[in-house]
Image: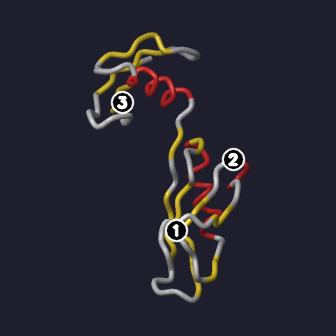
Amino acid sequence: MKKDLICITCPLGCQLEVDYDKSKIIGVTGNTCPRGGAYAEKEIFHPERVVTTTVKISGADPSLLPVKTSGSVPKGLTSKIIEEAFKLEVKAPVRVGDVIIKNVLSTGVDLVATRNL
């Protein structure tokens, strides 16, 4: 199988062409550094994302607190994490880095505030 990707590990944004089968990368072309190959393998077999969303907050203006995961989570869990955040309402004051949900969905990653409110 073949897939085109844009590598995001450095500012070059190399256009990768990845040739792979069910269990391994057969070849990667288009990368100008070795990190492109590692990125391609992770993106094909174990894609991860940092999730950014908002949580309702009372006692502050604006009424939405921006939050993000403290690290990458499996791509398939992004919408479930957003759903969990949607259920919450926190109370002000909140500081940047405050943990809003510890170990969100048992990922080992926290959902943290990204703004002081």
**Earlier-in-chain disc, 2 versus 3:** 3
SS class, disc 3:
strand
Residue at left offset 73%, top offset 49%: 106
Q: Helix, strand, or loop for circle 2?
A: loop
Q: Which residue appears at 64% of the width and 66% of the height?
A: 100
Q: Depth-wise, is mark 2 or mark 1 nearer the camera? A: 1
Query: Residue at left 69%, top 47%?
Result: 108
From mark 2 to mark 1, how far is it between C-alphas? 19 Å
- Residue 79 pos. (x, y %): 57, 54
Mark 2 lies on residue = 108
Residue placed at 56% from the left, 31% from the top? 46
Could you tell me which quadrant the N terminus lies in?
A: top left
Q: Amino acid at mark 3?
A: Leu
Q: Is residue 19 left or right of residue 78?
A: left
Q: Earlier in the sequence, mark 3 or mark 1?
A: 3
Residue 96: give its label: 1
- Where residue 59 sits, quadrant-wise, is bottom right
Measured in 3D between alpha carbons, the distance from the residue under mark 3 to the one under mark 1, in whole angstroms, is 33 Å
Whole-percent x, y for residue 63 in the image = 50, 83
Q: Nearer the viewer, mark 3 or mark 1?
A: 1
Q: Is residue 46 above or below residue 94?
A: above
Mark 1 belongs to which amino acid? Answer: Val
Position of residue 109 relative to residue 56, above or below, is above
Q: Residue 85's spot in the image, x, y percent?
A: 61, 66
According to the image, label 3 marks what residue?
Answer: 5
Pointer 3 with pointer 1, Cβ within 8 A: no
* SS for dot 1: loop
Residue 41 coordinates in the image, percent (x, y): 49, 23
Indicate the amino acid at tag 2.
Gly
